[in-house]
Amino acid sequence: MTARPLLRHTVAQLEEMFVAKPLDTGTLKALDTELQFRNVPRATALLRKVKSAISDGSLLIPSAQPELFTPARTPIHAIAQPQPIMTPPAVILPKAAAKPAPAVAEIPPMALDEAYKALRVTVGASWAEVEQSRFKIVQRAHPDTVAELSAEKRIAAQTEAKRANAAYTVLLGTC
């Protein structure tokens, strides 16, 4: 595994390091190693500059006293002007038209025997059975469950769930 001592540095900090020490062998090698892992445009541009400086032959100059030596060529960072970061144009997609919710008919008040039929339980059923039956009917109308159904089947499931809730309310009033 490669050691990455410059891992926590930003690309801007790495650029500053390159400008501050363009002839330092250790700095250039550390920058080269770190920039191999970065894919943003500024990092790849800096990597090209670092590789150019490394292959420039300026690495033959001892790094202990770089001010005593003059490079054979002008370093690339001195020639190239920093390019402004171009952001891609924003793509604005039109919003999808929302499907109108299908109209579910209102449920009229129902009699006690109708409520038992709507919930599919018998007159002597326990309250737990009534709640479980209502839950199953209402779950069939859940948006995730009816998402792939046709509009007619969706409306039927929602109407059945409304009837189950109305029947449950009727049975609650008898308790």
Image (cartoon, rainbow, N blue to C red):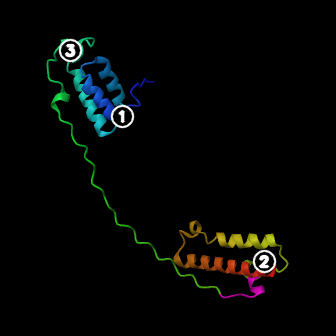
Q: Nearer the viewer, mark 3 or mark 2?
A: 3
Q: Which residue is mark 1?
A: 10
In space, the residues marked 3 and 2 are separated at their CA atoms by 94 Å
Q: Which residue occupies the foreground of this view, 100 or 7?
A: 7
How busy is the neighbourhood of tag 1: few (under 14 within 10 Å), some, or many (20 plus)? few
Q: Which residue is mark 3?
A: 67
How busy is the neighbourhood of tag 2: few (under 14 within 10 Å), some, or many (20 plus)? some
Label placed on residue 41? none
Q: Quadrant of residue 95?
A: bottom left
User: Which residue sits at x=30%, y=26%?
Assistant: 17
Part of the protein shown in magenta: 108-115
Q: Looking at the rendering, in which quadrant would you find the C terminus?
A: bottom right
Which amino acid type is shown beneath numbered disc 1?
A: Thr
Which amino acid type is shown beneath numbered disc 3?
A: Glu
- Looking at the image, residue 134 lies above or below residue 2: below
Q: Quadrant of residue 84?
A: top left
Q: Position of residue 73 (x, y in %)?
A: 14, 21
Is residue 174 rendered magenta in the image? no
Q: Which residue is mark 2?
A: 121
Labelled pair 1, 3 in contact (Cβ < 8 Å):
no
Q: Quadrant of residue 118?
A: bottom right
Who comes first in sequence, dot 1 or dot 3?
Answer: 1
In space, the residues marked 1 and 2 are separated at their CA atoms by 68 Å
